[in-house]
Amino acid sequence: MSIKLTLANNQVLTIDATTTLKAWKGTHDKDEATGKREYFAESIFDDVLAKDTPADLLVALQGLLRHSDWFAVGPDFDQVFQSRTVVSLKAE
């Protein structure tokens, strides 16, 4: 039970119930004294989407990607992807 996640560049990632994911949301703070902004990537998820069925995993992944700006797939997390580059999810 896995999800094939296809990116805009045709790269395919495989996500299953044991795949660790990390996700971030872009945010910023404004220093009121100087007016300067500092930008951050706030961590919003660092775990597995352990679900019983491919359909549940698909829905959980849809929700995570919708609410994140960036994500990475474990175990190495050596590449970070923009969530908006996901063009399809397919349960297998």
Image (cartoon, rainbow, N blue to C red):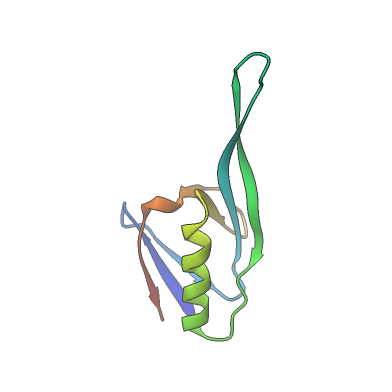
Residue 91 spot, x, y in % from top left: 41, 78
Image quadrant occupied by the C terminus:
bottom left
- In the shown orientation, is residue 40 left or right of residue 53? right
Above or below — where is 49 with respect to 87? below
Above or below — where is 87 with respect to 15? above
Residue 71 spot, x, y in % from top left: 53, 53
Residue 15 spot, x, y in % from top left: 51, 69
Residue 88 spot, x, y in % from top left: 34, 65
Name which residue lies at 55% across and 54% down: 72
Q: How many marks?
A: 0
Name which residue lies at 64% across and 13% down: 34
Above or below — where is 61 with respect to 8? below
Residue sticking out furthest to the top = 34
Residue sticking out furthest to the front = 32
Name which residue lies at 60% across and 17% down: 35
Task: Judge by depth and name the residue closer to the eye, 91 or 61.
Answer: 61
Task: Judge by depth and name the residue closer to the eye, 69 or 47.
Answer: 69
- Image quadrant assignment for residue 16: bottom right
- Any part of residue 28 in sight: yes
- Any part of residue 1 in sight: no
Residue sticking out furthest to the bottom = 53
Name which residue lies at 48% across and 74% down: 59
- In the shown orientation, is residue 85 left or right of residue 57? left
- In the shown orientation, is residue 81 left or right of residue 19? left
